[in-house]
Image (spheres, grey):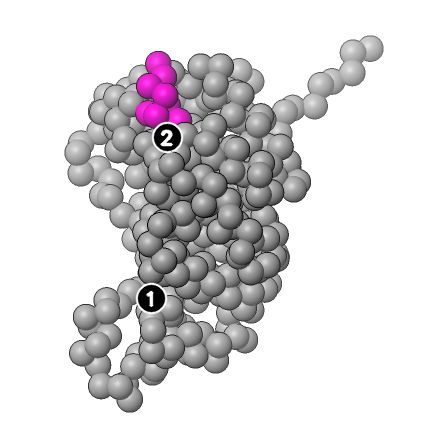
Amino acid sequence: MTTPVAPRPLPALGLVCITASPQIRYRTMTRTTYLKLAPEERAERLRELYLSNIEKFLEALSYCAWQGIRLYRVSSQLFPLSDWEDGVGAAVLEGLAGELARIGVLATARGVRVVVHPEQFVVLSSDSQAVADSAMRVLQGHARQMDLMGLPRSQWSMVLVHGGKSGRGEALAARIGTLPENIRSRLALENDEYAYSAQDILEVCQKTGVAFVFDAHHHAVHAKLEGYEDASIAHFTREAASTWTDPAWQIVHLSNGKSGFLDRKHSDLIDAFPSAFLDVPFVEIEAKGKEVAIADLLPRLQADVPVLSITRASPPEAAFPDEE
């Protein structure tokens, strides 16, 4: 009697920040608007905004669970101005500790992993002390938020940054060594199209013990590959796995070029999926179509023979706007 072969577990596909539909949207406030407020108004206005975004975050976690999405990258602008130099936003967040703690409880209950990816101006490798200090403040803010949310101090609750200024891998590694534990324990690095190749980031991660989030599209553009079945994709996927404290936590990024394979702009949907990513636990989908792209891709991966590449007519230019 033939023993049935257990199906290979599929990667968990991750949603980035918002939905293509209007369902998950966060409120914001610019510095200009904030500075126009009377000083006595600022704390209350931020408190009301933060409470609104906490409720929307909780809604996003339930939405992800309902859709079978087990990885969620929350917006890095969830609490605008919380790192502003006057300290008002930070104090407001501290006062909302009880509300923030609901996020960690619900994330655990719903089985949704939460990560964050600060903007590219967070440059730890900068030779400008002011830029490096600014990067540190941003990372301290995110780490403190995750602490208040009750999210673990580990790579499970990843805080992801790019390498920053090129040619400064040694400086980047040295600065990582100075980070506080609540940042360093969560930190991960990602390769990019120009400044830091996959090999560059791999070496920094191996030296510092932080996780490597391999981005296949960035690597393809940097190395000018012809497709995702290039041997280097499988190579860096395997090497990146070795940098995670638990390989079952590994995250990779996937997007496709909008007008062609090497177009830096993200496509609306995912037409090409690297076979090497079939064995990765978490694949964050960086497509403009957001949950639509995930729903479009998933049944192809679930097929007895996964459908990893398709060709279709290009969607209208404005099918999905550029939003995070």
Specify start and end residues of the magenta stretch as a single range.
218-226
| Label 2 crowd bin: few (<14), some (14–19), many (20+), radius 10 Å | many
Q: Nearer the viewer, mark 2 or mark 1?
A: 2
Q: Which residue is drawn at 58% across and 48% down?
A: 155
> CB atoms at circles 2 and 1 under 8 Å apart?
no
Residue at 43 percent of width and 79 percent of height: 91
Query: Secondary structure under badge 1?
Result: loop
Residue situated in front as seen by the camera: 323 or 231: 231
Q: In this view, does 212 lie to the left or right of 74?
A: right
Residue receiving disc 1: 80
Tag 2 secondary structure: helix
Q: Where is residue 12 in the image (x, y as percent from the top left)?
A: 54, 37
User: Which quarter of the image is occupied by the N terminus?
Assistant: top right
Residue 104 point in image, percent of width and height: 57, 62
The residue nearer to you, when weighing 137 against 249, is 137
> What residue sits right under mark 2 in the picture?
218
